[in-house]
């Protein structure tokens, strides 16, 4: 057998020598973990899974309109169902997506009216930063909630101003027969 010659420092490629020097000096920088955005929403916003043309399993997620008086169709986006997880209470779901990424959302809009009177629809498609998507999906959290105790005096006046209910003879007879 041939004798094994020891490996000399000059025998190693430059990139290996550089890597060994960096490790010896402790200069290795670990990459920072990617920041993620957690979006919480209701199960009712998640559609049925479907298979895309490319063969991937996807699911459509609806984005409710932030304004309750806006009755236009809701926007939506498509993600893998593996990203969506049930929360511990069973009524909601959550998903994590990269903070610095974007998501393509589409919203149906009316383009015009056909000759037969039916509306002609098209889709408005745009890319939204994931932080903005979180705000859109969780817009229900920013809605002001009215307290009945805060409006108690107004409610009492409203009830007092309502006309008195008329009691019919049938109602009186039924209450007496019991």
Image (tube, rainbow, N blue to C red):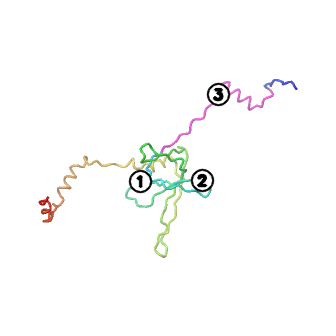
Give me the disc on residue 36.
none
Among the two numbered marks 2 and 1 on one chain, the one whose residue lies closer to the N terminus: 2
Image: 152 above or below 21? below
Across and down, in percent, residue 63 comes to 46, 54
Going by the image, does 56 lie left or right of 164? Answer: right
Corner quadrant of residue 14: top right
Q: CA distance from mark 2 to mark 1?
A: 31 Å
Q: Residue at x 41, y 44 (%)?
A: 89
Q: Are marks 2 and 1 in contact (CB under 8 Å)?
A: no
Q: Mark 2 vs mark 3: give the one in front.
A: 2
Task: Give the residue number, with chain letter if any, for mark 2.
Answer: 56
Task: Give the residue number, with chain letter if any, for mark 1.
Answer: 66
Outermost residue, front direction? 178
Task: Give the residue number, with chain letter if any, for mark 3.
Answer: 27
- Where are the magenta residues, as a range? 10-38
Q: Residue at x 44, y 42 (%)?
A: 88
Among the two numbered marks 2 and 3 on one chain, the one whose residue lies closer to the N terminus: 3
Q: CA distance from mark 2 to mark 3?
A: 41 Å
Across and down, in percent, residue 153 comes to 20, 49
Q: Residue at x 71, y 27 (%)?
A: 20
Among the two numbered marks 3 and 1 on one chain, the one whose residue lies closer to the N terminus: 3
Q: Residue at x 45, y 60 (%)?
A: 73
Q: Are marks 2 and 3 in contact (CB under 8 Å)?
A: no
* Element class at badge 2: loop
Q: Are marks 3 and 1 in contact (CB under 8 Å)?
A: no
């Amino acid at each position: 057998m041939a004798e094994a010659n020891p490996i000399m420092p000059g025998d190693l490629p430059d990139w290996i020598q550089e890597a060994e020097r960096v490790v010896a000096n402790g200069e290795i920088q670990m990459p920072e973990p990617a920041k993620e955005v957690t979006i919480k929403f209701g199960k009712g916003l998640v559609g049925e899974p479907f298979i895309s043309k490319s063969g991937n399993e996807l699911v459509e997620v609806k984005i409710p309109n932030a304004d309750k008086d806006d009755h236009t169709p809701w926007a939506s986006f498509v993600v893998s169902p593996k990203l969506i997880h049930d929360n511990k209470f069973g009524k909601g779901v959550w998903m994590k997506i990269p903070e610095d990424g974007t998501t393509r959302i589409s919203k149906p809009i009316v383009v015009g009216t056909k000759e037969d009177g039916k509306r002609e629809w098209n889709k408005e498609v745009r890319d939204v930063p994931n932080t903005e998507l979180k705000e859109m999906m969780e817009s229900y959290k920013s809605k002001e909630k009215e307290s009945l105790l805060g409006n108690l005096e107004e409610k009492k006046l409203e009830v007092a101003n309502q006309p008195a209910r008329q009691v019919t003879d049938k109602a009186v007879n039924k209450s007496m027969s019991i």
